[in-house]
Image (spheres, helix red, strand yellow):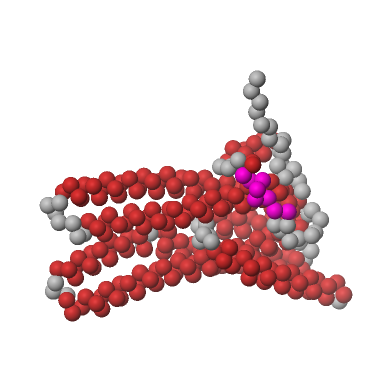
Amino acid sequence: MFKFRSQPLSLTSQNFIGYQRAEFEKASRLRVALFFVQLAVAIPAAVSVVIPDDAKVTLYVLAIFGAGLLAVWWVLNRWYVNARSAAQAARRAGLLLGGLNEPLSPSEVQSLRDRFTISAEQAAKYEQADYYATTKPPGASRLGEMLEESSFYSEHLQRVSSNVLLMIILLFVLAFVVIALATTPFVERDTTFTAVRVFLAMLVFAMSADVIGGYQQHRAAAEEIKDVRTRLAIADRNGYPLPDVLLAMTDYNAAVEGAPEVVPFIYNFCRTSLDQRWRDYQNDREEARHKRTAS
């Protein structure tokens, strides 16, 4: 007889945190691959500028190569979207279960399992008991603190991501200025126009949604999440009314899910600094609570 490995009937908040972290890491790796594939797609267009018209075989090879890269991009993008969607679903479920300690129905658990793109064994390696710093008992206050912590990290990571993409855009602008200044004395030469055509072909990459569009979306998300943080701070002073917390969670979800995935490796680079800033904020918040209680 065949033996099938059984899965637990329900998923805990820790299970969802494991899925969330693993799926986000997978999505991050796929975004890196998408970035370089998209850059590679622009290369045949740039190279074709310097290929003479009579080199038909070379041009056909470049066209086939470009089409192949486009197909690879399509597959990677589909995997990326699925992984990111699964990560966001796990994040939402982890917040609700971890904050309110209300179980999900079996049908909802099965629906979530169907969306995950990694195995339970892989997700288990990413579980982290102290992922959220709150020590509140289950309820609106706990969910509110978890949301505030998530929004704190998300806001800063989105802002740093927008700055990284802005630097990429500025590099292209700088390249344009350098080419313009360097070729001005030779403006009558054919090589000058060839260089300009190559640069214009590469602008297809710079003007893509992954660069300029990504910069705008990261920046907008950072501002929206900052507004959610402000509302959660006000909710804290009012004792975390559940409707306020749930509405803030809805808006937070809309902000992070409407933005691109943060630039890969940014979290690892900023983690130590952000962890310390969050601990400082927790201490300040606790001190403010004591003052309100004493007054």
Q: Nearer the viewer, residue 51 or 77?
A: 51
Percent from the top left, x then y, of residue 35? 42, 56
Which residue sits at x=30%, y=46%?
67
Hey, which quadrant is residue 231 in on the image? bottom right
Q: Work out which residue is located at the far right of the displayed protein and give it.
A: 294
Up the image or down, 82 lies above or below 46; here it is above
Q: Decide if residue 105 is on the left or right side of residue 217.
A: right
* Residue 225 visible to the viewer: no
Query: Which stretch did the figure color magenta?
Result: 122-129
Most common SS among magenta residues: loop
Which residue sits at x=15%, y=51%?
55
Is-magenta flag for residue 139? no
| Quadrant in which the C terminus appears | bottom right
Percent from the top left, x then y, of residue 111? 62, 38
Percent from the top left, x then y, of residue 93? 67, 48
Q: Nearer the viewer, residue 163 or 21?
A: 21
Up the image or down, 50 lies above or below 287; here it is above
Which residue sits at x=30%, y=72%?
176
Q: Nearer the viewer, residue 1 or 65?
A: 1
| Quadrant in which the N terminus appears | top right
* Residue 232 visible to the viewer: yes
Which residue sits at x=83%, y=73%?
290
- Give the tally of numbered discs: 0
Percent from the top left, x then y, of residue 196? 23, 68
